[in-house]
Amino acid sequence: MTEGKIVKISGPLVIAEGMREANMFDVVRVGENRLIGEIIEMHGDRASIQVYEETAGLGRGDRVVTTGAPLSVELGPGLVTNIFDGIERPLERMRLLTGSNITRGVDLPALDRDKKWHFHATAAAGAEVTAGDIVGYVDETEALRHQIMVPVGVEGTLEFVLTGEYTVEEKIGTVIGKDGTRTDLHLMQKWPVRVSRPYQSKLPPQIPMITGQRIIDTLFPIAMGGTACVPGPFGSGKTVVQHQLAKWSNVDLVVYIGCGERGNEMTDVLREFPEITDPRTGKSLMERTILIANTSDMPVAAREASIYTGITIAEYFRDMGLRVAVIADSTSRWAEALREMSGRLEEMPGDEGYPAYLTSRLAQFYERAGQVVCKGKDGRIGALSAIGAVSPAGGDISEPVTQATLRIVKVFWGLDASLAYRRHFPAINWLNSYSLYRDRLEDWYSKEINDGWNGMVAEITRILQAEAELDEIVKLVGVDALSSEDRLTLEIARSIREDYLQQNAFEDTDSFSSLEKQYAMGSLIFYFRKEALEALQRGADIEAIAGLPVREQIGRAKSVPEGETAAVYAEIRSEIDRQLAGLVRV
């Protein structure tokens, strides 16, 4: 333990001298209130410390004491359904202790030390174990089984492990190493947040993360274990998109990080998620959700730590063989925290004042995503998908945070304010968004959904691009100058935009679409197109085709419940045939 004295205070930055024996990234206690801080720079015996709490009241000469350990998180039963701040302090228990406003210096452990969990041992005494091997489990919620693993760095013979009721600190077993050392096993383990957890090997993207959002799953899919960003201006629906991903994605656990955004957005999450029924389990969505809240009115330094806290917790559950999604809202606010701390450290600024190491820090976050073979002898596979919102000032995606993010991630869902103003949600612009996973996932879609899936996607893309080109002609010479086939293309493009890509998050039957329903909807639109082309060739009028009543039925098809699509869509196909046949007779 090293003790020093404060010599300078600049907002959340405190400089202390007499800290020569301290280490980079050590956690320290600052002042009489023992505020939590972290050493981020060393010069001789002077340490620059970012304090994760309000520094008002500190003065020169106040004590700074190191804990001798880096900023770490507690990992064990009790994480799921909980809400933590940026350095993993449990906000609900803090509220009960200090009231609605967080009192400075309060330091509660992340995991409840008094609660007993029923542990089921699955390993037997005498078994040879290594890091990552599962020795038992705790049913943390009805939706999630929490596997208890041998900690990293532990290897040997399992002396004993016993089923029973335990707190997170009580001994559940012992491992005897080859050199005779004894290591006690507990339900809880700790891990430094700035160090990624190890795994055996990383796998290439193989399967999609199914979100139930048609524009994402069809045109811009993200692979399980992939990376994506959602940039967009204020009011374009970033938070709605991220809420939809958290609600409907086919992952086992969601870690939602509210990083520097408005407090009312986190309030909406806290109010909505407990009331939402998880379609996979029938239970509350909170039973597979962990919330990290470091909103804009909380200390700026803790905003930087919250990203690492969230992804470290996600890696822990990934190591159990689970599919985990980390949703960060937003990395722009995190980057602003980096910029503020960099300025106070008097570092040389980069583009727009951001530190020169912005890109490397973003890469360190996103590169912790992936589908991996976990530690342990059973070869289980876990996946961690990272999705970050970006909030560029004025919607300018040429700014440094967005551009640095786009160089790293493989999926770009570009939100468009003009679409949002037209009430088209999700407001993802289909002309400038992209997914580098789409080609890799084509085989999976062909085998698991339908041989025609990839052809349908290619045709949707072609028609939307053709619409953009035809719109330029229409602006110049008017729609009457187009051929009947081109006018039909515009009608089909409008149907794709309004009937397929547009989705209502507040309508139960439309908020989520299975891949099977998505293919059926797309096939219905293209069936109408094929029959309409034939009708045009037999002399039907394009105006009459565009005004057919069945067009409205196609538009309402997205609201058909999942189990009724086959019958209802068959009726609509029959109605298409009947109404087009009537036009040709005339």
Image (cartoon, helix red, strand yellow):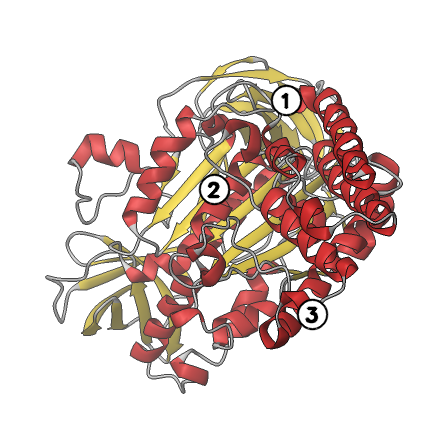
x then y, percent, for residue 214: 64, 43
Q: Nearer the viewer, mark 3 or mark 2?
A: 3
Write down the residue under mark 1. 136
For label 3, the residue is 481
Residue 379 image position (x, y, % from top left): 79, 37
How dense is the environment of label 3, judged by Cα within 10 Å: few (below 14), some, or many (20 and up)? few
Vertical order, 163 against 21 (above or below): above
Residue 477 higher or lower than 102, as above or below: below
Query: Residue 444 is drawn in which quadrant?
Result: top right
Q: Secondary structure at mark 1?
A: strand
Q: Quadrant of residue 7?
A: bottom left
Q: Are marks 3 and 2 in contact (CB under 8 Å)?
A: no
The three-letter amino acid code for the residue at tag 3 is Ala
Question: Hey, what amino acid is under mark 1?
Answer: Gly
Q: Is residue 22 left or right of residue 537?
A: left
> Disc 2 marks which amino acid?
His
Tag 2 secondary structure: helix
Q: Mark on residue 306?
A: none
Determine the secondary structure under disc 3.
helix
In the image, residue 551 sits, relative to residue 276, either above or below, namely: below
Number of other residues with Cα within 10 Å of mark 2, as a class: few under 14, some 14 to 19, many 20 or more = some
Residue at x 27% of width, y 43% of height = 107
Q: Is residue 222 something that shows in the picture?
A: no
Q: Earlier in the sequence, mark 2 or mark 1?
A: 1
Point out the image quarter for the C terminus. Answer: top right
Residue denoted by label 2: 243
Tags 3 and 1 touching, CB below 8 Å:
no
- Closer to the N terminus: mark 3 or mark 1? 1
